[in-house]
Image (spheres, grey):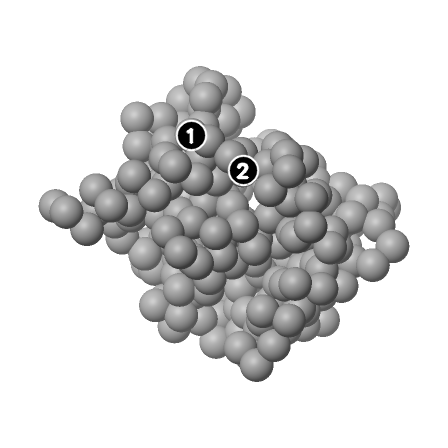
Amino acid sequence: MRHHPDALMIFAAGFGTRMGPLTADRPKPMVEVAGKPLIDHARAIAEDAGIGRIVANLHYKPEPLIEHLNGTGILLSHERDTLLDTGGGLREALPLLGPGPVFTLNSDAVWTGANPLGELRSAWNPDRMDALLLLLDPNDARGHPGAGDFTLSDGQLNRGPGYVYSGAQIIKTESLHDVAETVFSLNLIWDRMIAAGRLSGIVHQGEWCDVGHPQGIAEAEALLDYERDV
């Protein structure tokens, strides 16, 4: 079993309800930002980081995404009957991802600065971590209201206001098999890791924009334009 990740799960199965009419006829990863679908922004990050195996899960209106990804080499995990949430979806995709820790990346964000998967890879220490989450200072998290998701102390995470979870991580997958439910969130796994002192975090060197809602499109495009201009 490998101890360092070389496989990536892109979460792309959600309903995209916050997008309103923009997802009436397509899944959220096919919504365009700066002239290309969100799924292509995620693919570019993965390719730049040299990820060897990429899997995307599908559920809501999957046909446009299937057609778009045809020929890219991305493997597809079909959640045909039930949306399995992040934990259940990741477990369902394990036969495609292979054994050992994996990267995961939400498909509804854009990034500037350092490659997020590269940052995680450089900081990953499987001897003392069961998961490593990439976080943001709230000032660098556009389109994301609220006081943050985690506190960070000496590299260890706890629940509470402070840093925003970016949607990128490395996680060991063995504990997914300990959950009896079919549909479950990775929050359940993270809470168990927190209790064991095994959930770690680092802060992204750059900015990020949540594109889970229509207003996030303009904010994301403004962020990308700003990066090109500086």
Q: Nearer the viewer, residue 112 or 152?
A: 112
Q: Residue at x 37, y 41 (%)?
A: 220
Q: Residue at x 30, y 26 (%)?
A: 139
Q: Nearer the viewer, residue 191 or 164?
A: 164
Label 2, residues with CA under 10 Å away: few <14, some 14-19, many ≥20: many
Q: Are marks 1 and 2 in contact (CB under 8 Å)?
A: yes
Q: Is residue 30 above or below residue 52?
A: above
Classify the position of the C terminus by image quarter.
top left
Q: Nearer the viewer, residue 60 or 207?
A: 60
Q: Residue at the far left: name it.
A: 230
Whether residue 130 sits left or right of residue 65 in the image: it is left
Give percent across and percent down for residue 155: 37, 37
Give percent across and percent down for residue 87: 70, 47
Q: Is residue 99 above or below residue 12?
A: below
- Res 181 label: none
Whether residue 147 sits left or right of residue 97 in the image: it is left
Three-letter residue code for mark 1? Gly
Three-letter residue code for mark 2? Gly
**Residue 128 visible, this angle:** no
Give percent across and percent down for residue 68: 58, 69
Residue that mark 2 sits on: 212
Q: Residue at x 74, y 51 (%)?
A: 60
Q: Is residue 123 above or below residue 16?
A: below
Dividing the picture into quarters, in which one does residue 56 lie? bottom right
Whether residue 89 sits left or right of residue 4 in the image: it is right
Residue that mark 1 sits on: 143
Classify the position of the N terminus by image quarter.
bottom right
Label 1, residues with CA under 10 Å away: few <14, some 14-19, many ≥20: some
Q: Mark 1 falls on what kind of element?
A: loop
Give the mark nearer the N terminus: 1 vs 2.
Answer: 1
